[in-house]
Amino acid sequence: MITTEGRAYEQRGIVYVKTCRPAVDNLSDEVMVQWHDSRMRTAEQNRKAWALMTEIATFQVQDKEETYREQSISFTAKNMEMLQGKLFHLSQATVSEASAFINMLVEIILEYEIPTKEPLYTMCEDIQRYVYLCLMNKRCCITNRRSELHHVDAIGMGYNRHEKPQIGARVIPLAPEYHREIHNIGNEAFFAKYHIEPVRMDERLAEKYLDKKARREGNYGQV
């Protein structure tokens, strides 16, 4: 990808981008516009980030300022392109940067099974990404406890869900009591109550939920 600087301006509801064509042969006429986020992080994002870092610090028996320094350095190392080489500071972060930072903290909490005072689904910035991570870690997306796989889409007669998770089917990870609740009140009412969204099973998730025999046979099942 070749990057050039430019400026956007709007006329009659149409946005135009003015830039220079690079002096390179055989360039495509198709371009991708990447917008720089100039919105400063919100007070709610700041609250979420510090709440999550406090949970991590408590779990690690560490001062939360030290946790902030460590996580800022880790986030910077993983997001050099987004940050354009500058060190991440939450106080100076854009909305997009703060959102990515919060998502990283949520991922750490899921990976290390860190208990939280607030439900993680109320703290994340990208609900579908969060549910996907819960599925990968086999954690309930409501309680962060061990979960069961709930199929949102009906599965066919004779289908063994333990052997062939259906690629493309919508799924969600739930602790047993919430698995019972979703069957009692229905999918849509449950999603509206908890502001949760299912995700579609892909091959990475299928690998997580296949039993050993099915994994050896490469038996994934399609919908």
Image: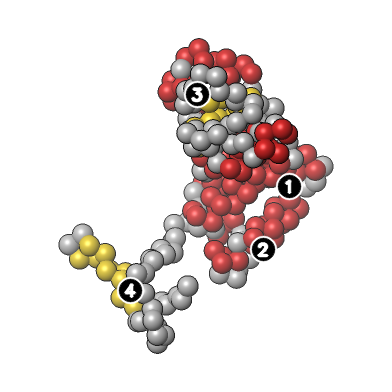
Disc 1 residue type (three-letter): Lys
Q: Nearer the viewer, mark 3 or mark 1?
A: 3
Find residue 64 and name its label.
Answer: 1
Q: Which residue is mark 4?
A: 29
Q: Which residue is mark 3?
A: 155
Q: CA distance from mark 3 to mark 2?
A: 43 Å
Q: Nearer the viewer, mark 1 or mark 4?
A: 4
Residue 81's place in the image compared with 5, above or below, is above
Q: Are marks 1 and 2 in contact (CB under 8 Å)?
A: no
Q: CA distance from mark 4 to mark 3?
A: 45 Å
Residue 211's place in the image compared with 93, above or below, is above
Q: Which residue is mark 2?
A: 77
Answer yes or no: is residue 144 visible: no
Tag 1 secondary structure: helix
Disc 2 residue type (three-letter): Ala
Disc 3 residue type (three-letter): Ile
Q: CA distance from mark 2 to mark 4?
A: 33 Å
Between discs 1 and 2, the one toward the N terminus: 1
Disc 4 residue type (three-letter): Asp
Dot 2 crowding, Cα within 10 Å, few <14, some 14–19, many 20+: some
Between discs 4 and 3, the one toward the N terminus: 4
- Answer with the quarter of the image where residue 109 lies: top right
Q: CA distance from mark 3 to mark 1?
A: 46 Å
Dot 3 crowding, Cα within 10 Å, few <14, some 14–19, many 20+: some
